[in-house]
Amino acid sequence: MDWSRPGAVVASLRHRFSPRNAAEVVAVLVLLTVALSTLSSWTRRSTGSLQSKTCDFPAIFNFGDSNSDTGGKSAAFHRLLPPNGDTFFGKTSGRYCDGKVILDFIAEKLGLPYLSAYLDSMGTNFRHGANFATGGSTIQPLDTRIFEGGFSPISLDVQLSQFEQFKARTLELHAGKSDYAKSSLPRPEDFSKALYTMDIGQNDFHAALKSMTEKQALASIPDMLNEFAVAVERLYQQGARAFWIHNTGPIGCLPYSVISYPPELNNTDKNGCVASHNRIAQEFNMQLKTLVSKLRLRLQGAMLNYIDIYSAKYTLISEAQKHGFGGPLEYCCGHLGDYTVYCGQKAIVNGTEVVGASCGDPLKVISWDGGYYTHAANQWVANRVVDGSLSDLQIRLMESCRESVSS
């Protein structure tokens, strides 16, 4: 029977019931009307409930290293040169990449502009947040060991201090009715409604592996995570409630690592990665996940979302050709190994000038310059980040403003 046609329903009922049973017909029609009304009401409530889960973040505040740097280190120390940025921006953009980093794709998903670097003072608008990440940053505060390793002095604690000053100055300018504040800074209420993203830790291990044994590097993880916990709690005290926390990727699969630390045959995984370095990253990630679970219990009203970046990147490396990429340990720009010419720079090799140029098709390569991922690889990973499949709570990016549950 075609239940979508009222006439068909009535005709059927007339056939089945005699006039003497008219009361039964009326009763059946009443029940149908109530059922359809209930179903319609439930559908509206269900749809409204799904819609209410979608977050409307007015701003993003990011803390991290080169994986999410959108111009901080370039502005503070030395400007990145082409071909960095060429694939998407058509010019250098302050990113250690030929195009966009994962943070850019997150901003796009939220309908927000690409995040400006806090340290970039030239034509910068912070209306929808600020990026405090700089290439080479570490979780641990700068010490002699980290400094001599060539890493950034703008560690996580410095980035937190910059944020606290940024927020204080923003509130002061709004209180003074500044026109600049209205047009170029977040609104005071945006700080508690914003998304706080964190992607840092990789450089701590690069620094450690230059100066200590792998066993010592593993032993340093609890101290790193203590610093990380302090940073999250400082942000919470400043009003942060929605956190999006990336773990660290497979550092042993970076072409730079494979070239710099040639592994013995028994220390190489199926993809040619330095297996012991990946085990260090995995141990850090396991302890970070535990820490995030503990912070959920302590920080009432906060949503802390732990994102398994490691799995996404390692899957891409393991299945490179399946997803349209070349060899998993290839890189596109510059030269590492028997001589070194960094991407976009020049060097004299055996009396000849050599340029760190780009490969022919960056869209088919996972690693941009041996240490960072390409625009195409970042996009592949980002597509899996925002859908919630990498979240330990299985929460989509667009739902991550909801109050956290203990886990």
Image (tube, helix red, strand yellow):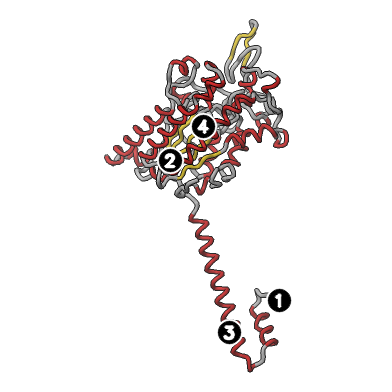
> What x and y, as percent, mark residue 399?
50, 49
Q: Mark 2, residues whose alpha carbon is within 10 Å: few (<14), some, or many (≥20)?
A: many
Marks 4 and 3 close (CB-CB < 8 Å): no
Check the image and report above or below for 211 versus 65. above
Could you give the CA–CA distance between mark 2 and mark 3, rounded to whole angstroms? 58 Å
Instruction: Between residue 307 and residue 110, name the one nearer to us.
Output: 307
Closer-to-camera residue (68/199): 199
Residue located beneath label 2 in the image: 128
Residue at horizontal 40%, vertical 43%?
Answer: 299
* Residue 279 vs residue 85, the one in the foreground: 279
Task: Give amino acid for label 3.
Answer: Ala
* For residue 23, above or below residue 249: below
Q: Which is more N-terminal, label 3 or label 1?
A: 1
In which quadrant of the rendered image does the N terminus lie?
Answer: bottom right
Q: Residue furthest top?
A: 351
Residue 68 — which label? 4
> Which residue is found at the position 49% from the left and 22% from the top?
79
Disc 1 target residue? 1
Which sits earlier in the primary sequence, circle 2 or circle 1?
A: 1
Disc 2 on helix, strand or loop? loop
- Tag 2: residue type? His
Q: Secondary structure at mark 1?
A: loop
